[in-house]
Amino acid sequence: MNFFSMLYPASNGGTVQETMPEFFSDLNLDQVIDAILLEKQEYGLRPIYYTPLTDPETVYFRQQIMQELEKPSLLALVKSFAEKMKSVRAHLVEMERFYYSSQQKAWFLDAAEMYCEAVQTLSDCLASMTLESQGFLAFRDYLLRYVRSAEFRTLLADVRRVKSKLGAIRYCLYIKGSSITVRKYEYEPDYSVDIEDTFARFRQGTVKDYLEKFSDWMQMSHVDAQIVEYLRKLFPDEFLELDRFRTQHDSFIDDSIAIFDREVQFYVAYLDYIALLRNRGLPFCYPKVSAVNKNVYAREAFDVALAHKLVRHNQPVVRNDFSLGGKERILVVTGPNQGGKTTFARMFAQMHFLASLGCPVPGTQAQLFLFDTIYTHFEREEYARDLNGKLKDDLLRIHKILSCATQNSILIINEIFSSTSLEDAVFLGRRIMEDMIRLESLCVVVTFIDELAALGEQTVSMVSTVHPENPAERTYKIVRKPADGIAYALSVAEKYGLTYPRLKERLVR
C-alpha cells in the first residue's frame, strides 16, 4: 500500500525552501501568502508556498488536483474530513493535559473512534465519486486498500468492542454527607419517571428546575477520579481492555492519511483565498507552463494582493494583458507617475510565481515560463547611515542581480537611477538593458526613460495610459505601444494652458 504525496507525482519528490524568498516583499507575495494561510497555521504549509516548481509534470499534477477540488461536493467532503481530523488531534493534545490515567485513556479511545469514522466516511464517499486527477485517484486507491486492511479492521473492531464494554457498565452511587459508596447496579427500580409523572399535574406555568447537572469541565476532579478507581476494582476486565487498547494502538493515525490531511490543505487554502475575488467576477485560469518556451502571455490579468484590498472597499479592479513572443524578452513600462506601472510589474511576477506552484492565476488565459528564481530591484529609501549613497547602492544591487541571474531567471526592475541626472540615467540604463538582452532572461523594466523602450527586437514598449479627455486622470491600463512621454507632457500642458503659444499669448496681453 504505497501512497506518496498530494503535491508530487509518485516519481518526483522535492525539497522545500524553509525561508521566505527575498523577492516576496517587493512583489507583495508576503501579503498574499499570509492571507492564504491565515486559517491554516497548524499545517505548516509555508515551505510549500515558498518553493516554486521547475518541471511542468509536477505543475500539471497539482493543477489537476486543484481543478478536481473545485467540484463543490469534493471540496465539502475534504473540508469535513479536515474538521474531523482536527478534532482527533485536539483530543490527543488535550488528553496529555489530564492528571488521571483513566481519563487520558478514555479520551484516546474517543479520538480513535473519531478517526475511524472520519476515514471510513471519506473512503465511502470517494468510492462513489467520479475522479480524474492522478493525485486523488492514487489516494482513493490507497484509502480503499487501507480500510480493508487487517490493521484498520483490527483498530475499528477494538474501538467498538472496548466502547461497548465500557458503555455497558452500570453502577450506583450512595451519597451521604461527604461519604460516597460505589457499587454495581443490581437492577433496582428507577422511580424518577414515576415521581415526575405524579407531580407533573401540580405544575403551574414555568417553574424552577431543581435537577442537578454534571459539570462540563473536561478535567476530572479528585472525587471523579476516586469513583473511577473504585469502578476499576468493580469492573476489572472492562478497564483492562481500555488499558490494552491504549498500548496496542499507541499510533493509530496512518502516516499516508496524515500526509494527505496536511497536503490537501495547500489546495483548499488557495481556493478559499481566491473565492472572494471570483465571487466579485474576477477570473482565474489554469495556465500553460513550460521550462523552455519563453513565449508568454496573459489576458485580463491583475495583481491579486491589490485586488483583495480593492474588492473589500467595493472598488473596481483594472485588468491588463501582456505578451512576449519570438525574440522578445523585456517589457519596458513607461508613463505617468501613479499610473499602475509598478502594479503591472508585480502582476507579471506574481503570475509566474503562482503558476510555478500549480495554482490558478488571475486572468482568463495565460501561458507562462517556469523560472529558476525571481530577482527584484525596487527603489529603497536612502538612509543617513548608509555611506554608499543612493546611486551607488542601486548600482551594487543591480550588479549583484546581473551576476547571479541566468537565462531562466525573471528580473523585475522598478524605477532605478532617479537620483542622478537624465544623461547619466540614460547611459546607465542602456548598459544594464544591454546586459539583460545578452542574458535572454524574461524581464519587466519600469522606467521614466523612454529611450530604453526601443533598444532592439528584444524589447517591447508598454505605456501606462491616461484618460484622453483628462490627461491628469489615470486609467491604470497598460497597453502595448511606443513610449511617448513628450505627448503626455504636452497634453497636460494643454489642459492647464501652459503650452508655449498659450503662455506667449498671455504675456502679450
Image (spheres, rainbow, N blue to C red):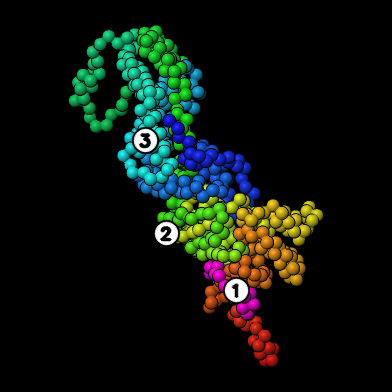
Query: Is residue 362 a member of the stretch shown in magenta?
Result: no
The answer to whether one can see residue 244 in this image is: yes
The residue range painted magenta reads 475-490
- Cα separation, mark 3 vs mark 1, equals 57 Å
Q: In the structure shown, which secondary structural element does the residue marked by tag 2 occupy?
A: loop
Q: Quadrant of residue 172?
A: top left
Looking at the image, which is closer to me, 64 or 120? Answer: 64
Q: Quadrant of residue 143?
A: top left
Q: Name the residue under label 3.
A: 122
Amino acid found under the numbered disc labelled 1: Pro
Amino acid found under the numbered disc labelled 2: Gly
- Cα separation, mark 2 vs mark 3, equals 32 Å
Q: In this view, does 328 lie above or below 228?
A: below
Q: In the rendered image, which quarter contains the C terminus?
A: bottom right
Looking at the image, which is closer to me, 34 or 188? Answer: 34
Query: Is residue 476 a member of the stretch shown in magenta?
Result: yes
**Mark 2 near mark 1, Cβ–Cβ under 8 Å?**
no
Q: Which circle's residue, 3 or 1, is located before the other in the chain?
A: 3
Residue at image position (62%, 51%) is 373
Q: How crowded is mark 1: few (under 14 residues within 10 Å), some or many (20 or more)?
A: some
Q: In this view, does 298 lie above or below 47?
A: below
Amino acid found under the numbered disc labelled 3: Leu
Q: Mark 2 points at which residue?
A: 281
Q: Which circle's residue, 2 or 3, is located before the other in the chain?
A: 3
Whole-percent x, y for residue 469 in the image: 53, 78
Q: In the rendered image, which quarter contains the N terminus?
A: top left
Q: Name the residue under label 1.
A: 482
Q: In which quarter of the image is residue 474?
A: bottom right
Whole-percent x, y for residue 102 in the image: 44, 16
Give the label on residue 61, or none.
none
